[in-house]
Amino acid sequence: MAIMEFPKDMKWGAATAAYQIEGAAFKDGKGPSIWDTFSHTPGKVLNGDNGDVAIDSYHRYEEDIQLMKELGIDTYRFSVSWPRIFPTGTGEVNEKGLKFYHDFVDALLANGIEPMCTLYHWDLPQALQDKGGWANRATVDAFADYAELMFKEFGGKVKSWITINEPWCVSFLSNFIGIHAPGNTDLQLATDISHHVLLAHGKAVSRFRALNMEGGIGYAPNVEWLEPFSNKQEDVDACNRSMGFLMDWFFDPVFKGSYPAFMVEWFEQKGAVLHIEEGDMDIISQPIDFLGINYYTGGVGRYKKDADLFDMERIDIGYEKTDFDWFIYPEGFYRVLAKIKDKYGSVPIYITENGACYNDEVENGRVRDQRRIEYLKQHLTSLKRSMDYGVNIKGYLTWSLLDNFEWAEGYDKRFGIIHVDFNTLERTKKDSYYWYKQTISNGWFDMNY
Ligand SMILES: N=NNCCOCCOc1ccc(-c2cn(C[C@@H]3NC[C@@H](O)[C@H]3O)nn2)cc1
């Protein structure tokens, strides 16, 4: 027996996001988001998929909450669609949008489930994008106003707030690499956006503090671990630059009040500079109550001139891959969490996303997703290792509760512990749902079973 046991007070949960599950994309007063625009632009999303209906959680959330209740989770992480609250991003509030989230949060609470609310999970109101989007500093203040309204509306009900999900995806994946909305490919633009998104985080935290709110607030960067192919300094430096892209660039400003010099210099060599205004770093670096961490994958890297923006190439050394073609690298989960503790201290951490894409289908009423169970066992074991290392883990939320719209991959990539038939919208609990339920109930699992 290799029992992995977790603290009795650790929170267990699952996560989703508005554009990926709600549907009702043009219903009840909701304004268009950049993902409505992007997914309706030919060639941007696999198979021409979009979130018009998604898995219709807008109308089916009561059924979904019953599935959460049976699962036994303490916490459910969801996101609010900004354009469902402010159809044009600012100005007049859509009362039907507020009512939807009040009814939803009330149903969670009535079923003993704590809501963890992400304010921004990528669905920027298109009206703001039309005025420059995150490249326009006015969007920062619009976000702060939206956040303040949500705090005032839901303060008594929601006690865990996440400002920005995966700021790297919002800035560099979406505006330099270009595979997510709005699909720009400009490093300077993406660099400016990365600063504005962090500033938006900071301004929302300031509004939260000014209201003397109950509960806590944080943000949820995505991280990965890249192990150098050798101990040659060029390999080590290349991996540090690549990890610095996702991590140090978005952690140092919040925890140290400045951008990592080695990355600033690298970006300057590539022609991208930061435009920091007086007071920005003070706003960004004010204390947060918890840190969300999203981890999926990692791998091995080595120096290769011009292989990518950081002169780093990823080496396939035979690690098994998920159906998203991502390496399965649980050791990296432990390594990155240990690095966060060593470099940034003991801020309370919730794992706000961890999970795997496996496209197992329903056969005779059952979904045999043993590969997902193995992924979860391996990564929860790494999480336990990090806790024994002293990392201040407060909770684990798997991505995702339900199969959903996986951005540029559309409905081709399944991350849920609950299968969704994307035609009938029927939900089917996968084997991993039952395994996770038992693990939550026990507070432990047997690595060998
Ligand atoms: N580092 N440099 N890379 C250079 C090459 O990049 C190409 C990489 O493209 C990517 C990178 C990352 C992702 C991704 C997806 N999810 C899963 C979602 N998380 C939030 C939630 O909504 C989930 O759906 N997390 N991450 C997708 C595509």
Image: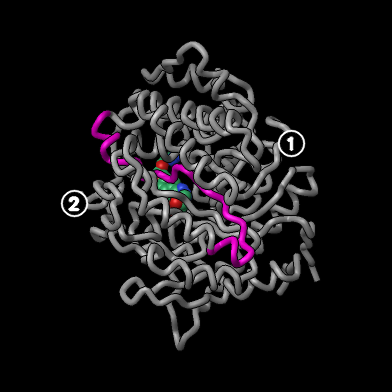
**Image-based side of 1 in relation to 309, left or right:** right
The residue wearing badge 2 is: 42
Three-letter amino acid code of the residue under disc 2: Pro
The residue at the point 54 percent across, 19 percent down is 281
The residue positioned 41% from the left and 72% from the top of the image is 420
Residue 346 shows which numbered tag? Answer: 1
Q: Callout 1: helix, strand or loop? A: loop
Q: Is residue 38 left or right of residue 409?
A: left
Q: Is residue 305 visible?
A: no
Quadrant of res 285: top right
Secondary structure of the residue carrying numbered label 2: loop
User: Is 63 a magenta residue?
Assistant: no
Give the quarter of the figure containing the N terminus. Answer: bottom right
| Sequence-earlier tag: 1 or 2 | 2
Image: 207 above or below 328: above
Residue type, label 1: Ser
Asked if residue 273 can be seen in this view, the reply is yes
Tell me where residue 374 appears, x and y as whole percent: 61, 67
Q: Nearer the viewer, residue 172 or 443?
A: 443
Q: Are marks 1 and 2 in contact (CB under 8 Å)?
A: no
The Cα atoms of the two marked residues, 1 and 2, are separated by: 45 Å
Could you tell me which residue is drawn at 31 percent across and 32 percent down? 133
Q: Which residues are magenta?
A: 107-131
x and y, in percent, of residue 340 in the image: 67, 36
At a point 60% along the width and 46% down the height, the residue shown is 160
Up the image or down, 342 lies above or below 10; here it is above
Q: Identify which residue, 302 or 274, lies in the foreground.
A: 274
Q: Which residue is more in the foreground, 198 or 243?
A: 198
